[in-house]
Amino acid sequence: MDISIVVPSYNEDESLPHLAEWIDRVMKEHGFSYEVIIVDDGSKDGTWQAAEKLHAANPCYRGIKFRRNYGKSAALNTGFAAAQGDVVITMDADLQDSPDEVPELYRMIKEDGYDLVSGWKKKRYDSKLAKNIPSKFFNWTTRRMSGIHLHDFNCGLKAYRHDVVKSIEVYGEMHRFIPVIAKWAGFGKIGEKVVQHRKREFGVTKFGMSRFINGYLDLMSIMFMSKFGKQPMHFFGAVGTISGLFGLVSLIVVLILRMTGSISLTHSVWFYLSMLFLVLGVMLFLAGFIGELVCRNSTTRNQYLIEKEL
Ligand code: UDP
Ligand code: MG
């Protein structure tokens, strides 16, 4: 099969029939073999009925229904596990992403050898204040921290080589960082394509301002996990040692000053600071040890992603 299109859908019953019609038209024009996986993320409207109807009319349409709303990342992760196509495309259900982009995305993966191609909504049709400006800032920091030069990390329209979606795990709100996760898993050839973006025609956006706060927290945990996830001691041990040494040296200085009689211990702020840093150092060190113990007992400690086998 050439293409799997994964469509996370949360209350999108009005959009789905239009999207399906458009996808079918493009796929037929180019003669692709394809499947469309609609992941109903616990919708309360007729999204699942819409998916059933599409499946009845055309078995290329598959549906996965969540019992409740788990979020876009969970929907994508489940769609990835089910996808069978050589190239897997993710696309929002709300008609903001254009299926006309699919053939070129497919070509970039197949012929140009990209592992992942991310859409770039160069001209956006969303509200300026709530989305465009915060998202510029968000993309800039993610670019700086991850070293991946994409303009639009959060674009719903992306294409992946089959191996990529089978090797990565997306959870929480990590869908904004799939390129970072893919790079970390060893898929470094990441490209970008300017894509058409359109106004949402039906329904409402599912993400509020909280996306930015959560986005930053997720970015921090991703960067931390990728650097120190397997060796927590490298981080906690280093910071703990610095803090402990600083505390020790300053305590010695304070004690010498006390013995020469130039200060009183309990009146010296340095004494308390020394103690603070010493204790902090020991605690961080312990956190590192406990982290190592957790890692050692984790069932995924030896899950490495193997690219090829003979
Ligand atoms: N979505 C989802 N689960 C959620 C929230 C959103 O599956 O909990 C889907 C939604 O149906 C849409 C896509 O993710 O297909 C993008 O959502 P939305 O259009 O609301 O985001 P925006 O375009 O405003 O960033
Ligand atoms: Mg949208």
Image (tube, helix red, strand yellow):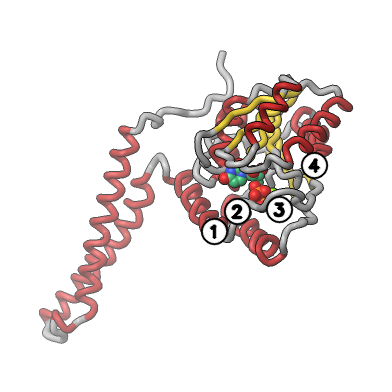
Residue 151 marker: 3
- Quarter of the picture containing the N terminus is top right
| Camera-nearest residue between 43 and 198 | 43
> Horizontal and vertical percent for residue 227?
47, 46
| First-in-chain label (3 vs 2) | 3
Tell me whether the residue at label 2 lies in contact with that at label 4, contact meaning CB atoms closer than 8 angstroms. Answer: no
Q: Which residue is mark 4?
A: 98
Q: Which residue is mark 1?
A: 210
Report whether the residue tagged 2 is closer than 8 Å to ligand 1. yes
Label 2 and label 1: CA atoms lie apart by 7 Å
Q: Residues within 10 Å of mark 2 (few under 14, many from 20)?
A: few
Q: Residue at x 50, y 51 (%)?
A: 218
> Horizontal and vertical percent for residue 167?
56, 30
Is residue 60 rendered to the left or right of residue 217?
right
Label 1 and label 3: CA atoms lie apart by 21 Å
Residue 207 marker: 2
Q: Residue at x 55, y 35 (%)?
A: 185
Label 1 and label 4: CA atoms lie apart by 27 Å
Q: Residue at x 62, y 27 (%)?
A: 163
Report which quarter residue 12 is drawn in.
Answer: top right
Indicate the secondary structure of the residue bearing disc 2.
loop
Tell me whether the residue at label 2 lies in contact with that at label 1, contact meaning CB atoms closer than 8 angstroms. Answer: yes
Q: Residues within 10 Å of mark 1 (few under 14, many from 20)?
A: few
Label 4 and label 3: CA atoms lie apart by 18 Å
Q: Nearer the viewer, mark 2 or mark 4?
A: 2
